[in-house]
Image (cartoon, rainbow, N blue to C red):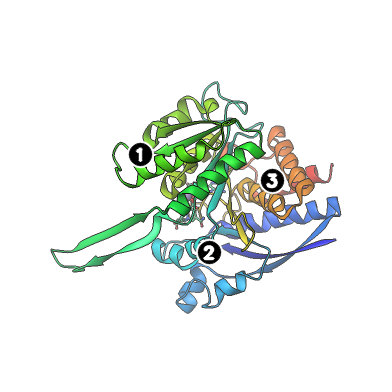
Amino acid sequence: MAKYEIAVIAGDGIGREVIPAAMDVLDVAADVTGAFELRWQRFDWGCQYYLDTGRMMPESGLSTLGQFDSIFLGAIGYPGVPDHLSLWGLLLPIRQHFDQYVNLRPVRLLPGIPGPLRDKGPDDVNFVCVRENTEGEYSGAGGRVHQGHPEEAVVQTAIFTRAGTERIIRYTFEYARRHGRRKVSSATKSNAINHSMVFWDEVFEKVAADYPDIQSDKYHVDALAARFITHPQTLDVVVGSNLFGDILTDLGGALQGSLGVPASANLNPEKRYPSMFEPVHGSAPDIAGKGMANPVASIWAGAMMLEHLGETEGARLVIEALEKTTAAREIITPDLGGSGTTRAFTEAVVRALRGL
Ligand code: NAD
Ligand code: IPM
Ligand code: MN
């Protein structure tokens, strides 16, 4: 039987509630298929660890994580620690260090969940966002001079490399081909951002020419944001830079009914390094500790992890159980208009998974 070593960083806020829930579901999937075992190792890193030690993770954190098959992460960041310190102390270094250059984020309305758009159901809201995940606006290059003085100046530089831009766009077309998707739409802003986004468009056009079987188009990101709302049915696969992809996928979460729904896979497609799976949402301090966080995003992220590990049947069963549970609407968390708890929803998914 296949055994997978999984590093778990539940992190902060509701990460500590939704990750254990998803782990329970994945363990049941392992049991039901009888095909694999997940060997979890928990790391208590995050904002409390920072307050105790002055670091978000130990100095050896990245090399420790490098020994695992996958990383399963909840959320990082909590009031009391500045967000740029917590995120640059833990989440963003993992994405960069392990060259997780693909951030795959499906935008799909699950059955039984009323989306916010009148007359748009699961048939209309069903596309995939591919976000560049290691450079662009999140390169971290820049600095401040004359700090605190009237002449203070700040530079934050977006870096787009040819290698980085080409590989994310090529991955997107390959993904479209592999999954029977027919169109790739590029998020640009080359009307105003006249260096990097003009370059992005050039690379997009060059790569698109290698895939005559896949349609391609591009939208300025402002118009694309509107299109998410007005014509979601015209989107199939969307590719965008790090920041554009970040913003568009919270909008995608809203289209899915709640930020408690969308999942995210940070992939190193070549499998040279571990990939990381997490919900799109953050630590939600406003509802943390109440037991009412929606675990759908984390369970879905868990299914994406199984898929990446090659456990296709397990992944399929988890998604089916999720869909059965949302379609029944007997237990739904408050963000989706219900009154169910994290635990009660999770138990319903487990029952569906066991065919009960
Ligand atoms: P957030 O995603 O944590 O919350 C936004 C809103 O969505 C809140 O009202 C919250 O209650 C709701 N929400 C989010 N997830 C939910 C769930 N599973 N069930 C029900 N409701 C849910 O975004 P934020 O408030 O901007 O960020 C809070 C903290 O999380 C910040 O420190 C931020 O930097 C961090 N953050 C971390 C990650 C990550 O680790 N991947 C992602 C996003 C934000
Ligand atoms: C996400 C989050 C992160 C991002 C933050 C917490 C740094 O918003 O995963 O979408 O912007 O990538
Ligand atoms: Mn985000």
* 147 lies left or right of 284: left
Q: Which residue is mark 2?
A: 94
* Residue sitting nearer the eye, 112 or 251: 251
Secondary element type, mark 2: helix
* 347 lies left or right of 169: right
How many marks on residues?
3
Q: Callout 1: few (<14), some (14-19), or many (20+) C-alpha neighbours within 10 Å? A: many
Give the residue drawn at x 66%, y 39%.
Answer: 178
Q: Nearer the viewer, mark 3 or mark 1?
A: 1
User: The residue under label 2 is which amino acid type?
Assistant: Ile
What's the mark number on residue 345? 3
Q: Nearer the viewer, mark 3 or mark 2?
A: 2
User: The residue under label 1 is which amino acid type?
Assistant: Lys
Secondary element type, mark 3: helix
Query: Is residue 259 shown to the viewer in this render?
Result: no
CA–CA distance in space, label 3 to label 1: 41 Å
Q: Nearer the viewer, mark 1 or mark 2?
A: 1
* Residue sitting nearer the eye, 295 or 280: 280
CA–CA distance in space, label 3 to label 2: 30 Å
Give the residue drawn at x 74%, y 39%.
Answer: 320
User: The residue under label 3 is which amino acid type?
Assistant: Phe
Query: Is residue 39 shown to the viewer in this render?
Result: yes
State whether residue 287 is above or below residue 188: below
Task: Name the residue at the left extreme.
Answer: 150
Give the residue drawn at x 50%, y 41%.
Answer: 207
Q: Which residue is mark 1?
A: 189
Residue 83 position in % (x across, y down): 41, 61
CA–CA distance in space, label 1 to label 2: 28 Å
Secondary element type, mark 1: loop
